[in-house]
Amino acid sequence: MRPFEYSRASSVGEARTLGGRFIAGGTNLLDLMKLEIETPEKIVDITRLPLNEIKETGDGGLKIGALVTNSVLAADERIRRDHEVLSRALLAGASGQLRNKASTGGNLLQRTRCGYFYETSQPCNKREPGSGCAAIGGFNRIHAILGASTNCIATHPSDMAVAMMALDAVVETEQADGHNREIPLRDFYRLPGDTPHIENELKDGELIVNIRLPKPKAGYHVYRKVRDRASYAFALVSVAAIVKMDGSEIAEASLAFGGLAHKPWRDPKLEAMLVGQTPKRKLFEDVADALLADAQGQGENDFKIPLARRTLISVLSEATQGA
Amino acid sequence: MNVTLSINGRDHALDIDPRTSLLDACRDHLGLTGSKKGCDHGQCGACTMLVNGRRINACLTLAVMHENDAITTVEGLGTAENLHPMQASFVEHDGYQCGYCTPGQVVSAVGMLGEIGDGWPSHVTKDIKTGTEISGDEIRERMSGNLCRCSAYPNIVDAISAAAGKTKEPA
C-alpha cells in the first residue's frame, strides 16, 4: 500500500475542507489500496460524522444516512416491511462481516470486480485511461451484455444499488463548495463510453450524505440473484422487481437489473409494456426480449443473454402470482 | 501516528503507520496472534474480530479508525483454562482440522448468534418481516464469510448449532 496522510473529520464541513479521499467502511477502498489500484495521497475518515441514522421523511419515505451499515439497513424494520426488495438485495450480497462494515454510500460507489481492473500487469481503461481493455477478447464471463463500449465491458457489482434503482432512490450530496444537491439514482451512474474511469456524476470532493427512498411501493417485492455459489458471490444476473396487481391486471411495475451492465440497469419501457396487461407467458417473453434487444455477448458471457431472459420471465411469473 | 485501541477490555497506546490494518496492529504490534491472516482481502474471514459487538474483517480496516471502539479478539473470548462455550463446542464437535481458520470461525459464530438474537434476517430467512430462527441453513448462510480450507464445515455447523442451543437455555 502506498503511504497516505490520514485525517479524521468531525463534521461534514470539515470533511469537505480537509480534502482527500473519503473513507467509511473501507471494505472496497482498502482492498484496492493494498493492490495499489487506488493510490490516494490523503484519506479523510468520515466514520465519525452524524450520518448513521434512518429517518422518516414527511412524505412517507425514508432518509438513510450514508454511513448506515448494510446490515443495519437490511435489518431495519421499516425497510423489511415497506421496502423488502432492498433488504433482500442487501442480504444477498457479500458476507456478514462485510455487511457489518460496508456503508450505504460506499456500496453505491464500489468498483467493478473485473479481473483485469484488479490485475495491474494488464491494460484497463478504467484503472489506467488509454491503456486498453484486456477483457474484450479475454476472460469475460462476468462482463456486461448491455451498454458496454469498445473501451470497457465491466459490470457494476452492487446488489443494493439494483434494488434502490427499482425503488427510485435519490442520492443527496454536499459538494466541495458546500452546496447540497440531489441526484436521482437513475441519473447517478454513467455508461463506460470513452471514459470508463468516470463511473458516476459525483464531482471532486462531493460527499454522499443521505440516500432517500420515496414513499413505499406497494406490491410484491422480489430480488432474484443468480450466481455461481449459493452465498457470498457476485451476481451473474440479478433482477429487482416490484409488481402491484389490480384484480387480474398489472397495475404498477418497477424493474431493475444487476450483472448486465456498467450500472444497475433500468429500462422504463419494460414497465410500460406490463402496466394494464394481464400476466401471461407471452407478455413476459416480449418484455424480456425488449430488455435484451440490444444485448451483445463478448464470448464467455454469451450465456448471460438467455440467463437474463429466463430469470426475468421467472421473476415476473412469481411476482404476478404472488401479488 | 498515535492511536489508543481498546482491545479485550484493555487500552493499548500505539505509534503506528496509518496503513496498519487492525489485524496487523493486533498481530504485529500487540502480540495478539490469535486472529489469523488468511487472504488479507476480506474474503476468508480468518481475521474476524468483534468491534462494538459486531463481527468484521480486521484485515480490511485501518487501526487508526478504531479509536474509542471496543474490540474483541479471540483472546478476549476465552482462555485455554476457561474456554468460551463456542470454543468448547468446537472442541467437542471436532469443528476443525488444521485449525487455522478456527479463531475466525469462533469469533464470527459468536457475532453471528448475536445478530440472530437481535432478530436480523438473512438471505435464507423465508419471511424477513417476522424474524428468524436458528437452523442449519441459517448458520451455513450466515457463516459464508468464513472459509475452511480443510472443509470441516459439517462439524463447524454442528459445533455452532450446539453452542446456540446452550446459549438459549436459561442460566
Image (tube, grey):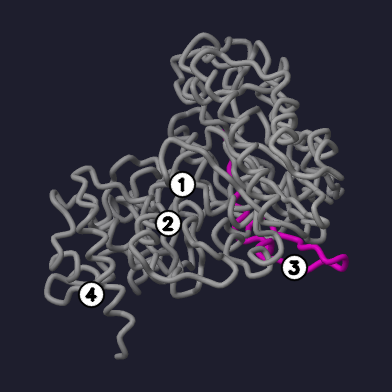
The quarter of the image holding the C terminus of chain A is bottom right
The chain letter for the residue carrying disc 1 is: B
Numbered marks: total: 4
Q: Which residues are magenta?
A: A40-67
The chain letter for the residue carrying disc 4 is: B
The residue pinned by badge 4 equals B85
Distance between the alpha carbons at the discs numbered 1 and 2: 19 Å
Kindly identify the amino acid type of the residue bearing the numbered disc 1: Pro
The residue pinned by badge 1 equals B18
Give how far across and how far down residue A48 sits, in percent: 61, 61
The residue sitting at 52% across, 23% down in the picture is A117
Residue B82 lies in quadrant: bottom left
Q: Work out whether mark 4 precedes mark 1 in sequence or the reverse, and give the earlier one.
A: 1
Q: Residues within 10 Å of mark 1 (few under 14, many from 20)?
A: some
Distance between the alpha carbons at the discs numbered 2 and 4: 21 Å
The residue pinned by badge 2 equals B56
